[in-house]
Image (spheres, helix red, strand yellow):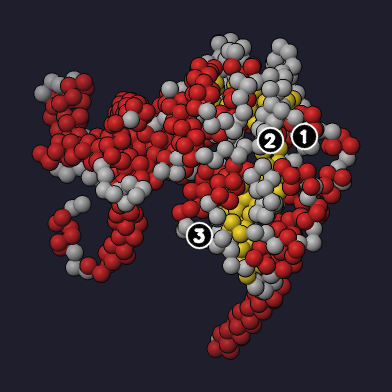
């Protein structure tokens, strides 16, 4: 009996040892972490596998936090709870943060693949980053209307359908102050960067008049609602529209003829970043063709990476939701309106609209 | 809450973790919120952030709408709870346990998931309209209306009304009811004169547990209101997340807290003459 106990103990010990060895060998495969970068980004805006790949290749860990809108990003960033090294956000927010001296210059000379990003896109960025000092283009696109071709009377080419009551109750608008004001200003024939109070107030009047016709103000769910047939049309970002058409081929995306907003999301290095060399490594990694391609295929937003665009099939190249054609963006503007007074006015008018 | 218990507690160190928890996650955040609420962006003392709940017509409107939803939701919960609890009371013990389990079951699921499910049910092309059209009725448009928010709130908070009422009704001595019946009371009189008054403590704690969260919630109105309808919770969320104005956001939160405390003082006074209610 006693012997038996000893044997059992021995087996137990042996098993413990084996387990420990297995655990340790598991550890051995992991890359040694030499540094950490904190990134705040939109949700699902990067292929998480690429973050792992980056850690494997360089030993630098990237911790990504998510924010739904640039405003939410800014709230999280400025609360200071986490010192973010990198932010990925939209044009107007980038301008605001550049003006507030929140960023440091990107060390372009340390970046081997920076020219994979087309010069056209660096030129876009000059609207808010005149010397291309701070911003690396990540994704870009337009705002337009996604609609169900089987349920509309005629093909849509104007913002008018949102405001003339023709499709009352079947319209979904963006639950985002800027996007909603921008397209309304465009419809009224004004610049979306206007600082003219009358023009902004006129846009609000129109939106208040439109509100009873609006089924809902949504952000991420616009696509799902149109795909599911709960609404006939919705105001949407071009990249979202691509995914919508993938799941429902009856859908069509249009950038109305009055023009719209062409938006560009960039990554920038904040003033809190202590190790810019690591940050530059990460930015360079994002420009690499295989990585940019993986990120593109993860979300299907328009990429500014020309190597990736060249690798697309002809059909994909001609899809206006993937590669917005030049003629559709002629009337479009980049949003650079960051005047505090304008933002406060819009914010107030938006609150009034929502409480109507 | 019960002072006698605290005094007779022989092992105060056992409550240590609780106090640390309360200080770290309730008291300190409250201090921060009050700090934001009572000062403006330049560090000057002001009451305008708190007064904003009444001084701005947008906030007044949202507060009023929140009150409507909260009162409506509480009323519906009471109306649904009593018949259900009375039915449960007359069930056999094993069936009663099972029925109660069924009532609590949805609470095991994340409440956002439950609300998202309602979104699917109520949407224009959703399950409800599919049912209606198959049966030959006209489809209804409930999604993104106050009705949708009301349905979601009632569904979500109903168990918090049922459980305390159930507990207090089950505590009622059966002899009292039988005595009343012997003396010629019909079921309705028994309910009005015996069951209702004796279940009052449970009813009051149910009201607090339903009224307060349905008044301050913002997720339900966000998901089921389609961004068109704003409760005061949505306004506060926007002050923080969109306008980036933490001072007004905190001020509104403090004002809301004061209003809620006032309403609870009211229910507390009512319980003072009976025994202390279950939760408060």
B5 or A109: which is nearer to us? A109
Image quadrant holding the C terminus of chain A, namely: top left
- Residue ID at (40%, 35%): B235
Task: Tell me the subunit letter for badge 2.
Answer: A
Image check: B258 left or right of A84? left
A157 or B103: which is nearer to us? A157
The quadrant holding residue B135 is top right
Task: First in sequence, mark 2 or 1: give its number.
Answer: 2
The quadrant holding residue B126 is top right
Q: Are marks 2 and 1 in contact (CB under 8 Å)?
A: yes
Numbered tag placed on residue A4 in the rendering: none
A314 or B119: which is nearer to us? A314
**Residue A24 location (% of width, % of height):** 66, 77
Numbered tag placed on residue A324 in the rendering: 1
Q: Secondary structure at mark 2?
A: strand
Q: Secondary structure at mark 3?
A: loop
Q: Residues within 10 Å of mark 1 (few under 14, many from 20)?
A: many
Task: Tell me the subunit letter for badge 3.
Answer: A
**Residue A91 location (% of width, % of height):** 63, 43
Q: Secondary structure at mark 1?
A: loop
């Amino acid at each position: 009996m006693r012997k038996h106990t000893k044997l059992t103990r021995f087996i137990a010990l042996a098993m413990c040892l084996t387990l420990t060895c297995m655990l340790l060998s598991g550890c051995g495969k992991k890359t040694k972490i030499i540094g950490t970068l904190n990134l705040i980004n939109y949700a699902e805006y990067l292929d998480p596998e690429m973050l792992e790949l980056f850690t494997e290749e360089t030993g630098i860990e990237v911790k990504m936090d998510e924010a739904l809108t640039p405003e939410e990003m800014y709230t999280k960033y400025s609360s200071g709870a986490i010192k973010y090294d990198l932010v990925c956000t939209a044009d107007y927010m980038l301008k605001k943060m550049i003006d507030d001296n929140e960023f440091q210059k990107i060390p372009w000379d340390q970046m081997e693949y920076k020219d994979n990003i087309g010069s056209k896109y660096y030129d876009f960025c000059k609207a808010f980053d005149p010397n291309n000092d701070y911003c690396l283009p990540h994704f870009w696109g337009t705002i337009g209307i996604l609609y169900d071709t089987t349920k509309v009377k005629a093909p849509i080419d104007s913002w008018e359908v949102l405001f003339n009551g023709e499709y009352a109750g079947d319209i979904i608008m963006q639950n985002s102050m800027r996007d909603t004001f921008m397209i309304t200003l465009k419809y009224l024939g004004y610049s979306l960067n206007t600082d003219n109070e009358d023009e902004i107030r006129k846009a609000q009047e129109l939106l208040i008049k439109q509100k009873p016709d609006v089924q809902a103000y949504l952000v991420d769910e616009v696509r799902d609602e149109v795909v599911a047939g709960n609404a006939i049309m919705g105001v949407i970002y071009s990249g979202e529209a691509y995914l919508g058409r993938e799941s429902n081929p009856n859908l069509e995306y249009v950038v109305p003829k009055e023009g719209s907003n062409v938006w560009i999301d960039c990554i920038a290095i904040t003033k809190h970043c202590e190790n810019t060399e690591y940050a530059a490594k990460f930015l360079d990694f994002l420009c690499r063709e295989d990585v940019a391609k993986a990120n593109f295929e993860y979300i299907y937003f328009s990429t500014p990476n020309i190597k990736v665009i060249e690798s697309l099939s002809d059909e994909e190249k001609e899809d206006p939701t993937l590669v917005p054609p030049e003629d559709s963006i002629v009337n479009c503007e980049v949003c650079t309106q960051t005047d505090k007074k304008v933002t406060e006015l819009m914010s107030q008018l938006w609150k009034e609209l929502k409480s109507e | 809450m019960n002072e006698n218990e605290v005094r007779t507690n022989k092992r105060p160190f056992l409550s240590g973790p609780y106090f640390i928890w309360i200080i770290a996650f309730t008291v300190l955040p409250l201090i921060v919120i009050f700090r934001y609420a009572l000062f403006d962006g330049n560090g000057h003392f002001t009451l305008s952030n708190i007064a904003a709940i009444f001084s701005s017509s947008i906030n007044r409107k949202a507060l009023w709408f929140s009150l409507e939803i909260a009162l409506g939701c509480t009323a519906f919960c009471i109306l649904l709870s009593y018949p259900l609890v009375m039915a449960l009371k007359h069930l056999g013990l094993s069936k009663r346990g099972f029925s109660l389990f069924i009532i609590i079951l949805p609470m095991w699921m994340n409440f956002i998931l439950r609300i998202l499910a309602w979104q699917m049910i109520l949407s224009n092309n959703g399950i409800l309209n599919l049912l209606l059209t198959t049966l030959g009725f006209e489809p209804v448009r409930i999604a993104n209306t106050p009705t949708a928010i009301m349905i979601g709130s009632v569904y979500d908070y109903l168990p918090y009304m049922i459980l305390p009422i159930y507990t207090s009704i089950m505590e009622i001595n059966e002899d009292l009811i039988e005595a009343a019946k012997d003396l010629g009371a019909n079921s309705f009189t028994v309910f009005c004169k015996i069951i209702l008054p004796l279940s009052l403590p449970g009813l009051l704690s149910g009201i607090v547990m339903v009224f307060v969260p349905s008044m301050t919630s913002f997720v339900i109105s966000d998901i089921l209101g389609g961004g068109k309808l704003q409760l005061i919770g949505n306004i506060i969320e926007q002050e923080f997340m969109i306008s980036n104005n933490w001072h007004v956001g905190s001020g509104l939160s403090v004002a809301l807290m004061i209003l809620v405390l006032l309403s609870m003082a009211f229910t507390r006074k009512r319980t003072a003459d009976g025994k202390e209610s279950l939760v408060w």
